[in-house]
Image: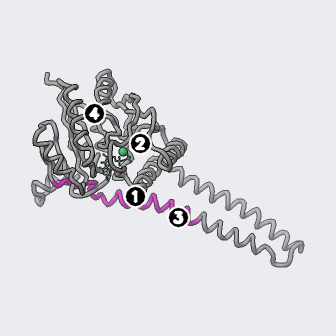
């Protein structure tokens, strides 16, 4: 029987400062894992710096490296999805390329997989983010565990290993707004955790802007919970009931002549603004769901591959169409 294979999927966006170190450490890990046949799939997500030429140079010297070059910057989740689409190993590791996910943990993930787990989650026992980012992460995880329709473990980011079957199912989930920790929990299988200390970014600034992180968090909430909609329904019903009671009191007062003069201007203004606010918020919420639905039905590809090195370029969905040339591929 041939030795089992392992793919390590790493998205890269403007990581020139730490790319050399990343490649060296990944190579060392691959050597350590032999006779497991290791392949590292780098997905270049439209880097504007020297990352791509550096990757190409690395790949020329290292046959275990495969490169996927996307046609522009699509974002962290689409880049990961691109790597996963090309992975066909017995087990696949997905990890960030900023060395916050230490490659040296991979042998431990592999061992846990060999012990029978189908999904191995690398769980942070500590976090290095501080300040606003830290508070944001903490708040999000607490809020999210309250609101999501099923349990999604906190403290798991990208870093994980999936066996062939689990990966196949994760890949087959069709949605465009991808919240990986949620999707990974949703597919089930035998999941185990391996604890690790999350390192600081080895160099450079975080490549995910705060805005993207917020969108990502919202993707998590809106694709794993319908509670916001239900909460709005309940808020509406409660306000209607309270409104009805107050109206009754005023009508009775008026009819019995207790209060005749037109007073209550302040109350009126407050109520109008309050209700207006609630209505706009509800509309906005509806819009979030509607916008996402619209995005899903358009079925635009999640990423476009410009070229590949060390791995066959593929066209899984459009293989029957005749107008694609060998360098254009989409999923
Ligand atoms: N990344 C990417 N495309 C992007 C932004 C980031 O492929 O548009 C990559 C980045 O190079 C890194 C990983 O995704 O390997 C995680 O990014 P980052 O460290 O900035 O995210 P954070 O740690 O803030 O979640
Ligand atoms: Mg990072």
Q: Which residue is mark 1?
A: 293
Q: Secondary structure at mark 3?
A: helix
Marks 4 and 3, how far apart at CA: 41 Å
Counting other residues with Cα less than 10 Å from the Cα at mark 2, is it few (<14), some (14-19), or many (20 or more)? many
Counting other residues with Cα less than 10 Å from the Cα at mark 4, is it few (<14), some (14-19), or many (20 or more)? some
The disc, 4 or 3, on the residue closer to the chain's N-terminal end is 4
Image x and y of residue 155, in percent: 45, 37
Mark 2 vs 1: CB contact within 8 A: no
Q: Which mark is residue 283?
A: 3
**Side of 240 relative to 187 (left or right):** right
Ligand 2 is found in the corner quadrant, namely: top left
The disc, 1 or 4, on the residue closer to the chain's N-terminal end is 4
Here the colouring is: one colour
Is the C-beta of the residue carrying label 2 under 8 Å from the nearest atom of ligand 1? no
Marks 1 and 4, how far apart at CA: 28 Å
Residue 10, located in which quarter of the rendered image?
A: top left
Q: Which residues are magenta?
A: 279-306
Counting other residues with Cα less than 10 Å from the Cα at mark 1, is it few (<14), some (14-19), or many (20 or more)? some
Taking depth in this image into account, of 152 and 210 the one nearest to the observer is 210
The disc, 2 or 4, on the residue closer to the chain's N-terminal end is 4
What residue sits 47% from the left and 48% below the top? 133
Q: Which residue is mark 4?
A: 165
The disc, 2 or 1, on the residue closer to the chain's N-terminal end is 2
């Amino acid at each position: 029987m041939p030795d089992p294979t392992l793919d390590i999927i790493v998205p890269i966006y403007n990581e020139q400062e730490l790319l050399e170190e990343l490649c060296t450490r990944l190579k060392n890990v691959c050597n350590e894992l032999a006779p497991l046949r290791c392949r590292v799939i780098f997905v270049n997500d439209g880097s504007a710096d020297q990352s791509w030429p550096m990757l190409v140079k690395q790949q020329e010297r290292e046959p275990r490296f495969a490169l996927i070059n996307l046609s522009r910057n699509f974002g962290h989740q689409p880049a990961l999805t691109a790597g996963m689409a090309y992975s066909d190993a017995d087990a696949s590791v997905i990890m960030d390329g900023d060395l916050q996910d230490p490659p040296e943990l991979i042998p431990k993930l592999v061992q846990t997989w060999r012990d029978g787990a189908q999904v191995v989650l690398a769980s942070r026992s500590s976090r290095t983010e501080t300040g606003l980012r830290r508070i944001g992460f903490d708040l999000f995880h607490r809020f999210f565990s309250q609101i999501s329709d099923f349990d999604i473990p906190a403290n798991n980011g990208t870093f994980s290993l999936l066996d062939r079957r689990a990966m196949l199912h994760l890949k087959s989930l069709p949605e465009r707004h991808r919240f990986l920790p949620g999707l990974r929990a949703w597919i089930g299988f035998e999941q185990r955790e391996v604890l690790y200390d999350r390192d600081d970014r080895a160099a450079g600034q975080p490549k995910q802007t705060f805005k993207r992180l917020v969108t990502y968090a919202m993707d998590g909430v809106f694709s794993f919970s319908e509670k916001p909609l239900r909460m709005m329904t309940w808020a509406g019903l409660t306000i209607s009931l309270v409104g009805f009671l107050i109206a009754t009191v005023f009508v009775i007062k008026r009819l019995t002549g207790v209060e005749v003069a037109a007073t209550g201007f302040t109350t009126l203004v407050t109520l109008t603004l309050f209700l207006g606010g609630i209505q706009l918020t509800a509309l906005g919420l509806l819009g979030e769901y509607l916008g996402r639905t619209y995005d899903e039905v358009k079925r635009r590809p999640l990423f476009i591959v410009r070229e590949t090195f060390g791995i066959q370029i593929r066209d899984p969905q459009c293989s029957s169409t005749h107008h694609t040339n060998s360098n254009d591929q989409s999923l």
